[in-house]
Amino acid sequence: MRLSKYFIPTLKENPIDAKITSHRLMIRAGIIRQTNSGIYTFLPLGLKILQKISDIIRKNMEEISCNEILMPIIQPKELWLESQRYDSYGQEMLRMNDRHNRDMLFGPTHEEVVTDIFRKNIKSYKDLPKSFYQIQTKFRDEIRPRFGVMRAREFMMKDAYSFDLNFEDAKKTYDDFYKIYFKIFKQLGLNAIAVRADAGAIGGDLSHEFHILAETGESIIYYDRKFEQLKDKITEDNINELQNLYSAADDMYDQSNCSIAKEEVKSHRSIEVGHIFHFGDKYSKALNASVTNKDGKEIYPLMGSYGIGVSRLIAAIIEANNDENGIIWPEEVTPFAVHLINLKPENEECAKICNELYSKLKAKKEILYDDVSGSIGAKLSNADLIGIPEQIILGPKSLKEGCAEIKNRRSGQKKMVKIEELI
Amino acid sequence: MRLSKYFIPTLKENPIDAKITSHRLMIRAGIIRQTNSGIYTFLPLGLKILQKISDIIRKNMEEISCNEILMPIIQPKELWLESQRYDSYGQEMLRMNDRHNRDMLFGPTHEEVVTDIFRKNIKSYKDLPKSFYQIQTKFRDEIRPRFGVMRAREFMMKDAYSFDLNFEDAKKTYDDFYKIYFKIFKQLGLNAIAVRADAGAIGGDLSHEFHILAETGESIIYYDRKFEQLKDKITEDNINELQNLYSAADDMYDQSNCSIAKEEVKSHRSIEVGHIFHFGDKYSKALNASVTNKDGKEIYPLMGSYGIGVSRLIAAIIEANNDENGIIWPEEVTPFAVHLINLKPENEECAKICNELYSKLKAKKEILYDDVSGSIGAKLSNADLIGIPEQIILGPKSLKEGCAEIKNRRSGQKKMVKIEELI
């Protein structure tokens, strides 16, 4: 992509209202812009990162045979009356009337809608287990939106829903998600911890939150020290051990009630990026979504739901990958693999060589090509700010020696490489 | 994809409330399900087709250097007061209050939001021309939603917005979109006609609607017979000629005011799938989005907007590609390339060979693999209903001869092919 045709409105100065690193850098690097309190536009770089994160999630959902669908944003009140959540959900739910004065709402979650689809289309045990997910915009009317996409009102989420015949199967499905969440976060270059959580408005009795450790996180999590070694080698055998290790989200922690000694408990500030729930037949029963079992009896399938905060993950990744000069994207989610920087586009020879390099390299890798005239200092500091992992820097000086400078954004290491070698 | 792990809830009978072919087939083939009046869930097949259509649009938008972004769904009233559209937009706009009682709306279109982003980030003529697009969910509160996704309330749209320095540049941008729209529809396997249109609520003076000819269309379009030959060879030279040929959308047509003889006017029922507008400085002026020109003077960029009805296109494609047995997907947008049908999954030899075929073929093509036990008749009629272009049918009979039957869904032609050849 040629920068001259692209749109990355970088800023030199920190925006005053951005309190945390990721928010500051997302504004400064031209990733997002605020349209309204807690409501953001994803600019080209931001959308590209969202798409990379979504692709990683999609691949992993496919691996556990979870089917992607797209449910509506606007939901009818009636479904929420059936589940008895309409009144209890509170002010976070954005409610409205349509032109015929019917009560509608902007979906903050989709248990009701997915259960409605299930009851209308699945009648037999033969079709189970079944699970569905979507990657979609949600709205939760936070009382004090803050920290950019970290606590936004409109945000992107991956939400999955599972249906099983009995607890044994449902626990297996729950474990599949538990395991694959660690894999997803690892593939995103993140170190995740799962802690026991309160099921809250979703309801239910088995629930874990997934957190990324970060000093700027809004949460504090508590967990058994053993967790960190165990989590990298999850197997069928030790998954229960792992889930049963002491761990607690912020509001669940109480040392006087804690099953292990204080010295064994590690605590850390963190960012919540995922939440999984098993809630049994709460919704299938409320919405009368039964299936016939092998013996011809009607039973209520057991359900779970499984969320990942897709847009919030961008902030979490930045919190874990930055330095004083800007963002450092992990290879897995970087919007471009290489940042080709022409220091003097108005120099004919520079332009010729860079254009040639660009057209050769772009067949193999995603390249951002800075072909715009400007000060060399600004170009280089913008490149560090945007944070693409590899920079190829070319100017009249290096060109005299037939070379380009390659800079690794993370290590800061630079080396001169012959242009022929690059091609 | 193994059908046993997937979700295609097909129906034998036509749903009573579905009046047109595409709506009937989308329900029967398990592509969509209604959640509420004019509000649909896209099931796995439906979402896959949406994604194929979106990919074709994305590739073409990139070709004309249009930058993909994602603007918010929920917009603040204030922006619409600036453009003076808040009151005039009428009841199609879904309005609501947030918890702090601020007026918000579910975006039916994004001229205001994109102009707001522009004015906050682009200040100089050097950054122009610039255009942006998004593929996103819109809501328009139709008084009588009908025909499935054809006239839905919640739907998916590609909406693009352009900014140019002067009319010459803006016309060039308009023409770029005009041309690439024909290309996009052709790549979707559709025959499009562009007709002069009223700019309506968007405003402006140069506007074309893109229609697909279909007997079940809600519109009637009128156009000069010469159009059909000319449109397949659009060049820089004849684009004005093409745009100036007599053509009219439904509400624009009046034979007494028509510039050509009645015999030269062709009319046809059709489905509107795209709409492009040039509206000059209407929004840039209203929102004071000026840039500095070469002489240091503040000027208002000229804008256009360019829509494609992404979810409606699924219905348009089906209207143009079906027979009495079901859908016939064009290669370009088919959810799967091949439908592998095991007629007797409970037969060990059949299962073995089909599993082998599946694992070999899926490395090269997207395969839907029917591995579910059921009646042979139901399997075959479901395959025709779903409409994947190539069927590979395997049962104990053909297996005895070491063969599979290949059926072309469009032509209906069948041939026996040796299994080794297939592998």
Image (tube, coloured by chain):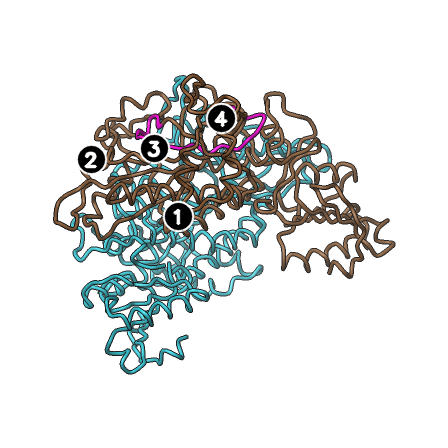
Chain colours: A cyan, B brown
Q: Is residue B200 magenta?
A: yes
In this rendering, the count of numbered labels is 4
Q: Residues within 10 Å of mark 2 (few under 14, many from 20)?
A: some
Q: Are marks 3 and 1 in contact (CB under 8 Å)?
A: no
Q: To which chain does the residue with label 1 belong?
A: A
Q: CA distance from mark 4 to mark 2?
A: 33 Å
Q: Which residue is mark 1?
A: A309
Q: Which residue is mark 3?
A: B206
Q: To which chain does the residue with label 2 belong?
A: B
Q: Please indicate whether residue A82 sits to the left or right of residue B320 in the image.
A: left
Using the image, determine if residue B200 lies above or below residue A100.
below
Q: Please indicate whether residue A310 sits to the left or right of residue A153 in the image.
A: right
Secondary element at tag 4: strand
Q: Which residue is mark 4?
A: B221
Q: Amino acid at mark 2?
A: Lys
Q: Quadrant of residue B329?
A: top right
Q: Is residue A254 magenta?
A: no
Using the image, determine if residue B324 lies above or below residue A224.
above
Using the image, determine if residue B110 lies above or below residue B339.
above
Q: Amino acid at mark 3?
A: Leu
Magenta region, residue range: B199-220
Q: Is residue B386 visible?
A: yes
Q: Residues within 10 Å of mark 3 (few under 14, many from 20)?
A: some
Look at discs 1 and 2 and give the one toward the viewer: 2
First of labels 2, 3 by sequence position: 3
Q: CA distance from mark 1 to mark 4?
A: 46 Å
Look at discs 4 and 2 and give the one toward the viewer: 4
Residue A67 spot, x, y in % from top left? 56, 45
